[in-house]
């Protein structure tokens, strides 16, 4: 079946560091892929998406490229801020439902 | 515009007790969802409602019931709570035709002792 695997956290970085959070998937075909973010004490919110292979989704300085060769959708940001501290979830679209990764907690230290 | 609201925010139940989690959205969305979030497991879909008057099981429906009261409201009921239902519960909604772009409520943290 379809599944999403994310790197385990927590990931701890200093402010202005480069961020990569790995996400790989197993799926039939080329499903749409998503990153959601959950800030402390809040519900999840959509961060970015990519609907086909080689698409790049971007929002708030974050980027992720849909790579079918490596079945990956890694999340990147060039310079993180303390306010980026949150839990990040990778997800794929499957039969009108989202299949979720386990989430990666990101901690940014000033 | 409050988005998706959930009540209560926190709840402690004893094994065997029942309760209903309430969810409402004011975005005129047709589809609504209930998830549970457990450490290290991401989100798992309990039930969803593609439109008013319809409900369908998700990945983990056992022990739960739902009611789509109207277009705005979608409630989740635990008839006889068990410790395994200790979790954070999220309600979400989406526009018809965009089921993967979901808007989430702030969650209900439920503890069953």
Image (cartoon, helix red, strand yellow):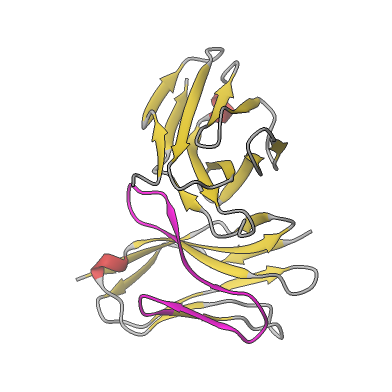
Which contiguous range is marked in magenta?
A: A37-62
**Tally of numbered tags:** 0
Q: Quadrant of residue A38?
A: bottom left
Q: Quadrant of residue B45?
A: top right
Residue B14 in the image: above or below residue B37: above
A26 relative to A86 in the view: left or right: right
Residue B11 showing in the rendered view: yes
Residue A51 located within the stretch drawn in magenta: yes
- Picture residue at 36% right of the left edge, 83% below the top: A18
Where is residue B98? Give x, y as percent. 61, 60
- Picture residue at 58% right of the left edge, 45% below the top: B30
Where is residue A5? Give x, y as percent. 62, 65
- Picture residue at 70% right of the left edge, 82% below the top: A68
Residue A3 in the image: above or below residue B1: below
Q: Quadrant of residue A45?
A: bottom left
- Picture residue at 70% right of the left edge, 42% below the top: B59
Where is residue B2? Give x, y as percent. 34, 44
The residue sitting at the left extreme is: A110
The residue sitting at the top extreme is: B16
Residue B41 showing in the rendered view: no
Residue A35 in the image: above or below residue A95: below
């Amino acid at each position: 079946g379809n599944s999403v695997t994310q790197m385990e956290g927590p990931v701890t970085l200093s402010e202005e560091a480069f961020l990569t959070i790995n996400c790989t998937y197993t799926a039939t075909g080329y499903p749409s892929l998503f990153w959601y973010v959950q800030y402390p004490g809040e519900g999840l919110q959509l961060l970015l998406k990519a609907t086909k292979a080689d698409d790049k989704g971007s929002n708030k300085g974050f980027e992720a490229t849909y790579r079918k060769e490596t079945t990956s959708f890694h999340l990147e940001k060039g310079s993180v801020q303390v306010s980026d501290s949150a839990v990040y979830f990778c997800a794929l679209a499957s039969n009108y439902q989202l299949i979720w990764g386990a989430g990666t907690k990101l901690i940014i230290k000033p | 515009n409050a988005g998706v609201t959930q009540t209560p925010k926190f709840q402690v139940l004893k094994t065997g007790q029942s309760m209903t989690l309430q969810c409402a959205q004011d975005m005129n969305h047709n589809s609504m969802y209930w998830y549970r979030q457990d450490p290290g497991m991401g989100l798992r879909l309990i039930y969803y409602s593609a439109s008013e008057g319809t409900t369908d099981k998700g990945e983990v429906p056992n022990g739960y019931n739902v009611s789509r009261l109207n277009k705005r409201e979608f409630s989740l009921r635990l008839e006889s709570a068990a410790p395994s239902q200790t979790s954070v519960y999220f309600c979400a909604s989406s526009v018809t035709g965009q089921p993967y772009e979901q808007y989430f409520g702030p969650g209900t943290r439920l503890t069953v002792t």
